Amino acid sequence: MSDESVAYEEVVERVWPGQTVEIEVLGGGITNHNLKVTLEDGSAFVLRIAGRETDQLGIDRHVEHEASLAAAAVGVGPEVVAFVEPEGYLVTRFVVGRIVPLEQMAEEGTIRRIATSLRAIHHGPPLPSRFDPFQIVEDYRSTAFARGVQVPAGYVRARQIARQIERVRGPIPERPCHNDLLNANFIDDGELIRIVDWEYAGNGDVFFDLANFSVNNELDASARRLLLEAYLGSVGPAAERALELMRFMSDFREAMWGVVQMAVSELDFDFEGYADEHFARLERTAADPAFQAALATG
């Protein structure tokens, strides 16, 4: 038995002492370890074990817990069963369903269902933290620099553009947002599309959430317009501009997340390649006429 398996069993025993359980390691995620734990009576749960030094990524496990409770309260997130302290491990009820495949994310029916889930979250109870992508990229740079990791040359130009975007966006109403809308975080239970993994949640710009979803799931211009229509009910120029601008910020945050992971993670994963991929994509976004027009508006 591996040391990792022993560690898993020790945590499970703390949560379900004296019970006979079946443990299955779930896929997905490169920051945490997720286990499906099934009890003798057939009830199943997900035990989320935080990875090493995830606080350096701006993650606060108490905020994740509060965000998970808020998502459950509006019917989008799974039921929260326990919060294990002091480590901040999270236990939620296992949702029977399937991860929505990437190739289905741009379909009209999927977009409309996801827009419904996002509206519920964005109009749900406020969270005890803020998510400011403009500040986060700077925090990530400082963390990487302090750990001796060289920040890619693309950072300087990206930060200049980000400052322009921040001026154009100006003050905005802040709503509870997920901020990490990869397709692996959407589970279709047959009725609702539920959203999991709330570790980056915070009050922020809903257009960052919408942009993050559109970039991560490769929505083209037509699908992005459909997303705005499904979410807002109608599409105006201001909303289209906001979405285009925040698509850049989504990739900038993701690129700098990869840079910080180069400094703190012990996982066997190409974080340098991950960062380079997102820097390249934000450069393509910056060269797009729609983005340039949106930026010029300010």
Image (cartoon, rainbow, N blue to C red):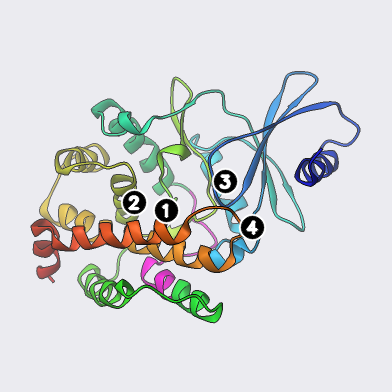
Q: Secondary structure at mark 4?
A: helix
User: x, y percentage for residue 172?
Assistant: 30, 65
Closer to the camera in the image, 83 or 282: 282
**Where, by quadrant of the figure, is residue 223 drawn?**
top left
* Disc with the residue nearer the chain's start (2 vs 1): 1
How packed is label 2: few (under 14 Cα within 10 Å), some, or many (20 or more)?
Answer: many
Residues tagged 3 and 2 counted as in contact (Cβ below 8 A): no
Amino acid, disc 1: Asn
Calculate the distance from the C-alpha at mark 4 to the C-alpha at mark 3.
10 Å
Q: Is residue 10 above or below residue 64?
A: above
Q: Which residue is mark 4?
A: 62
Q: Secondary structure at mark 1?
A: loop
Closer to the camera in the image, 221 or 130: 221
Q: Which residue is mark 1?
A: 179
Calculate the distance from the C-alpha at mark 4 to the C-alpha at mark 1.
17 Å
One can see residue 34 in this view: yes
Residues tagged 2 and 1 counted as in contact (Cβ below 8 A): yes
User: x, y percentage for residue 15?
Assistant: 81, 41
Calculate the distance from the C-alpha at mark 3 to the C-alpha at mark 2.
19 Å
Mark sitting on residue 128: none
Residue sitting at 76 percent across and 55 percent down?
85
Q: Secondary structure at mark 2?
A: helix
Amino acid, disc 3: Ser
Calculate the distance from the C-alpha at mark 3 to the C-alpha at mark 1.
13 Å
Residue sitting at 19 percent across and 42 percent down?
220
* Disc with the residue nearer the chain's start (4 vs 3): 4
Residue sitting at 60 percent across and 61 percent down?
54
Q: Which residue is mark 2?
A: 212
Number of marks in the rendered image: 4
Q: Which residue is mark 3?
A: 68
Q: Is residue 237 left or right of residue 188?
A: left
